[in-house]
Amino acid sequence: MRGTRRGAGLVVHVDSPTEQRNPRTTDIDQLSTVGILAAINTEDRGVPLAVQGVLPQLAAAVDYATEALRSGHRVHYVGAGTSGRLAVIDAAELVPTYNVPPEWFVAHHAGGEQALRHAVENAEDDDATGAAEMSAAVDRGDFVLGLTASGRTPYVLGALRAARQRGARTGLVSGNPEAPAPPGLDVLVAIDTGPEVIAGSTRMKAGTAQKIVLTAFSTATMIRLGRTYSNLMVGMRATNAKLRGRTLRILKEATGLGAQVCDDALTRAGGDLKIALVHLLTGVEVVVATEALSATGGHVREALEAVRPRAS
């Protein structure tokens, strides 16, 4: 990244593969509509492979997040532009999907709520605001994950610096493998998706990679925290008719029992899917299942192991 003065402001030159011209798409404006879509689709196929190359680093981030949440702390996402919007979406979806407290995952987006719909001028260049938000929101023991396509967004780097000073662990998901890791960073997830279909349009492959990473990161964290049983969402909150139907279906699939038996168990469990599941799989009373889940932090398999000797 290089900065030069031009006229009234600073011009930043970002050295990143995402800013380079893609030799495979130089004639994209001459293709048919299907040809344009095919070119985009061909480039997109390489994104999961790029993510595969950073799985060890992503696993470290998951472990940091899991440790933070288990010890009563929080996970913070920090991003600007597309990165920040994706972070807001991921944090919002975890509440109904896994019934996690809304304060577990906190998304900080440069420019605030206004920037979700409209670009806010220079918001991403404000490192002081990023630092101030972390100073006000982050505690020792939290995990802060920054997201930036360029690897150098001042708002994100300022936030990470302040978070470290607050005693939090920090990670960075970057779309620029050429950008250096910020000082003191605990884990760098640098994804190389190469030149974009349209040079510099990081909402394309770089954004897709960040969406994949965020979904995998939060899902793996939920699994490690016992918010699933097998590959079933047992921590979900039934906030609408579809989710209420899914809750009953999950209980039927997990236990192999009939709809009426499962519905009755859910009623006895006060609608709590985990309690009903432990109750049905072990035969213990609802109050025992409730105590076991409380003692294991809501981890279904650990609760099952705890109560099975009592049920036998």
Image (cartoon, grey):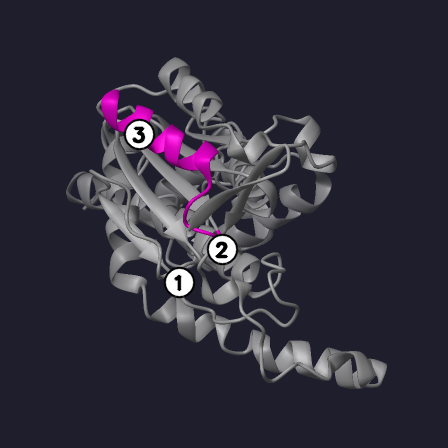
Structural crowding at the residue carrying mark 3, measured as other residues with C-alpha within 10 Å and reported as few (<14), some (14–19) or many (≥20): many
- Position of 297 with respect to 269 (left or right) is left
- Magenta stretch holds residue 219: no
The foreground one among 231 and 42 is: 42
Q: Which of marks 1 and 3 is in front?
A: 3
Label 2, on which residue? 210
- Magenta stretch holds residue 151: yes
Image position, residue 29 (x, y; %): 79, 78
Whether the residues at callouts 1 and 2 have beta carbons within 8 Å, the answer is yes
Magenta stretch, main secondary structure, is helix
78 to 12, vertically: above or below: above
What's the mark number on residue 191?
A: 1
Q: How far apart are marks 1 and 3 (CA)?
A: 21 Å
Where disc 3 sits, the SS reads: helix
- Identify which residue is drawn at 34% across, 32% down: 160
User: In the image, which residues are magenta?
Assistant: 149-166
Q: In which quarter of the image is residue 64?
A: top left
Tell me the amino acid under the disc marked 2.
Answer: Gln
Image position, residue 213 (x, y; %): 44, 56
- Position of 40 with respect to 202 (left or right) is right
Image position, residue 282 (x, y; %): 30, 46
- Position of 212 with respect to 197 (left or right) is left
- Position of 39 with respect to 187 (left or right) is right
Where disc 1 sits, the SS reads: loop
Q: Nearer the viewer, mark 2 or mark 3?
A: 3
- Identify which residue is drawn at 39% across, 50% down: 173
Identify the residue at the far right of this view. 32
Which of marks 3 and 2 precedes in the sequence? 3
Label 3, on which residue? 161
